Image (spheres, rainbow, N blue to C red):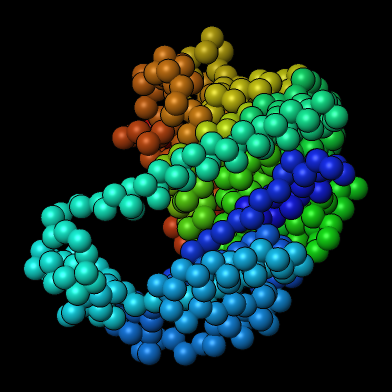
Amino acid sequence: MALAEAHLATLFNRPGHAIVDHCTYFVASDGDMMEGVSHEACSLAGHLKLGKLIGIYDDNRITIDGTTDLTFSDDTARRFESYGWHVERVADGNDLGALDAALAAARRQTDRPSLVIVRTHIAYGSPHKQDSPEAHGAPLGAEEVKLTKQRLGWPSLEPFHVPEESLEHWRRARDRGARLEAEWRKRHDAYRAAHPDLARELERRLAGRLPEAWDADLPGFAPTDAQATRAASGKVLNALAAKLPELIGGSADLAGSTHVVFKNGGDVAAGSWGARNVHFGVREHAMGAILNGLAVHGGVRPVGSTFLIFSDYMRPPIRLAALCHLPAIFVFTHDSIGLGEDGPTHQPIEQLAGLRAIPNLTVIRPADATEVVEAWRAAVQHQSGPVALVCTRQKVPVIDRARYAPANGLRLGAYVLADAPGGRPAVILMASGSEVELVLGAYETLAAAGIAARAVSMPCMEFFASQPRDYRDAVLPPSVPARLAVEAAAPQPWYRWVADHGVVLGLERFGASAPYQRIYRELGLTVEDVVRKAKELLE
């Protein structure tokens, strides 16, 4: 969030018009300080010198299982100082004057983020539960609440009693907020008058509106342009970036492999926050979380990338993006055993199934460069949740769209690429990504043998599942039980689409280290295997 503020301030603020100007605050617990993502994110925040980022660390030294003496002996202050943070200490969390002074000191730091370490006591005032792990996960109970109120000199033992002076103090916040908003709107009106074009662009970006003709100049790809879908993705991204300046992001130390690089976009660094290429480092979990923060703040559209196998490191932020309906775009490459010699540690098997299991996450695995264009178009338009674009490392042929159906069928999730005479197939072959090539080859072989087959590309199961039943039945007629799905991954997601009598050619094992062509042969994923299995189904 602090990065988004710094980025937009650099782009839109002008002398005398600080229209983007706010601090970002977070509250963290002992448990947060233990989690690995805090190390990843705070290290990067210090490196980028995000001076308007202020954390309040609630140092009560209690977790669910007991005191932090059992698990935690870090010197948190020195750790954060080593990250390049400014550190303040408040010895008594109930000393509001000291806390206010520490926060004021943090706000004066413009060249580094700040952490305010506040010593507190869980269940403060409770005669029996203060500083006890029991207070972490359970209510104090009616009698202990009564004793606590008496010990603290609370003016009433009635439940939910709010003293008048407290109510008056809180209600002042409403008036103060209204005054601050009115002041900002006055500044915004002055900004709009002085810089009308900048104001319109900022308003568009904050509203999430796409500009006119944003997708008018996307590249085209000919059947002779065989290439990895990751390479095509990089070309499409840069065509989009020229029209969508809100796109910002990068990779977890793999930009050269994922092709998520904004040409002439500059590198985000301390003092260069208006650039577009974020170097997240080898920090997949933090990258996913930072993308979410950028999306929550607004005014930018975040893109992050890594190998598909490393989606395991960032599953929590992917899930959170889906839960919060955040329009983050996750680009994953090296999507199968097709990455070859890097071997089973890097070859994803269960990752596609795992991502497809996350509610509200849209997973798109394009078959070729022409589907990549449509995948990016769909991803940019989809703003009600995150999108995972899954691309190949290896080259794949570009489907001849003069011969087969147009790639804009991707927006429907699945579409008929090639069909039997009269649209009456005896067997349906379906696949996603690089395996669509196998399905099309098998279709041609079966057609030459006089067997009525239908080839279906299914790049996005979520889009297809959301289509009306009539459309789904038109692509996968219930009257055709002979269905064969092909994907170089765990087969679970496909059983919904092949139904009771269909078969999935997938992988129930880890991969191997060899040239990808050999791996596909050894693991039974070839055109010949698809043809043989289709004939077995028909028999």
Label tally = 0
x, y percentage for residue 242? Answer: 84, 35
The residue that appears at 38% across and 90% down in the rendered structure is 69
| Quadrant in the picture for the C terminus | top left
x, y percentage for residue 295? Answer: 61, 44
In this view, 270 is above or below 537: below
Residue 480 lies left or right of residue 351; in this view the side is left
Residue 77 lies left or right of residue 121; in this view the side is right
x, y percentage for residue 240? Answer: 78, 34
x, y percentage for residue 430? Answer: 52, 33
Q: Identify which residue, 43 or 55, lies in the foreground.
A: 55
Q: Residue furthest top?
A: 422
The residue that appears at 75% across and 61% down in the rendered structure is 279
Where is residue 148, by image quadrant? bottom left
Q: Identify which residue, 225 or 10, lies in the foreground.
A: 10
Asked if residue 180 can be seen in this view, the reply is: yes
Where is residue 470, by image quadrant? top left
Where is residue 269, by image quadrant? bottom right
Q: Residue furthest right?
A: 264
In this view, 443 is above or below 174: above
Q: Residue furthest left?
A: 143
Residue 191 lies left or right of residue 311; in this view the side is right
In this view, 62 is above or below 5: below
Asked if residue 533 can be seen in this view, the reply is: no
Q: Identify which residue, 339 or 448, lies in the foreground.
A: 339
The residue that appears at 48% across and 75% down in the rendered structure is 118
The residue that appears at 46% across and 17% down in the rendered structure is 471
